[in-house]
Image (tube, grey):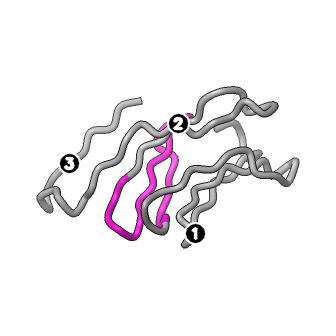
Amino acid sequence: MPESRYLISSGSDKALRLWDIEEGREKCVFYGEGAIMSVTMITPSSVAAGDSLGNLYILGLRGSLVGSGTALVFFGHVPLTHLPSQTALKLTG
């Protein structure tokens, strides 16, 4: 994600939102199954988020950040409650 022009927010409404802070508007939104409790950038164009139901979501930023073509693309999710406690996940970008 270029510079600090963009912000990702999450919350109890189950939404993960990408904001353009210079324009003060939402660029795109993704809805999880539970309240999104945490989010982090794992590469400049990939996001990992966890929800209140124990799911880990992997999303990618696709399209142009300039204009209306931006999208958060859902790559998949892992129900962490079904993994052994010592499991390591390998994320590739």
Q: Earlier in the sequence, mark 1 or mark 3?
A: 1
The amino acid beneath tag 3 is Ala
Q: Residue furthest top?
A: 63
Q: Position of residue 52 (x, y in %)?
A: 39, 70
Query: Does dot 2 land on a helix, a strand or a loop?
Result: strand
Q: Position of residue 76 (x, y in %)?
A: 37, 41
Q: Position of residue 24 (x, y in %)?
A: 85, 54
Residue 73 is tagged as 2
The residue indicated by pointer 1 is 13
Magenta region includes residue 49: yes
The amino acid beneath tag 1 is Asp
Q: Main secondary structure of the magenta part?
A: strand
- Marks 2 and 1 sit apart, C-alpha to C-alpha, by 19 Å
What residue lies at 58% left-to-right and 69% top-to-bottom?
13
Q: Nearer the viewer, residue 57 or 21?
A: 57
The residue indicated by pointer 3 is 88
Query: Does dot 3 land on a helix, a strand or a loop?
Result: loop
User: Would you call the spot at circle 3 few (<14 residues within 10 Å), some (14-19), or many (20 or more)?
Assistant: few
- Marks 1 and 3 sit apart, C-alpha to C-alpha, by 29 Å
Q: Quadrant of residue 70?
A: top right
Magenta region includes residue 76: no
Q: Residue furthest right?
A: 23
**Which range of residues does the magenta coloring cover?**
36-56
In front: label 3 or label 2: 2
Left or right relative to 45: residue 21? right
What residue lies at 32% left-to-right and 64% top-to-bottom?
54
User: Would you call the spot at circle 1 few (<14 residues within 10 Å), some (14-19), or many (20 or more)?
Assistant: few
What residue lies at 69% left-to-right and 36% top-to-bottom?
2
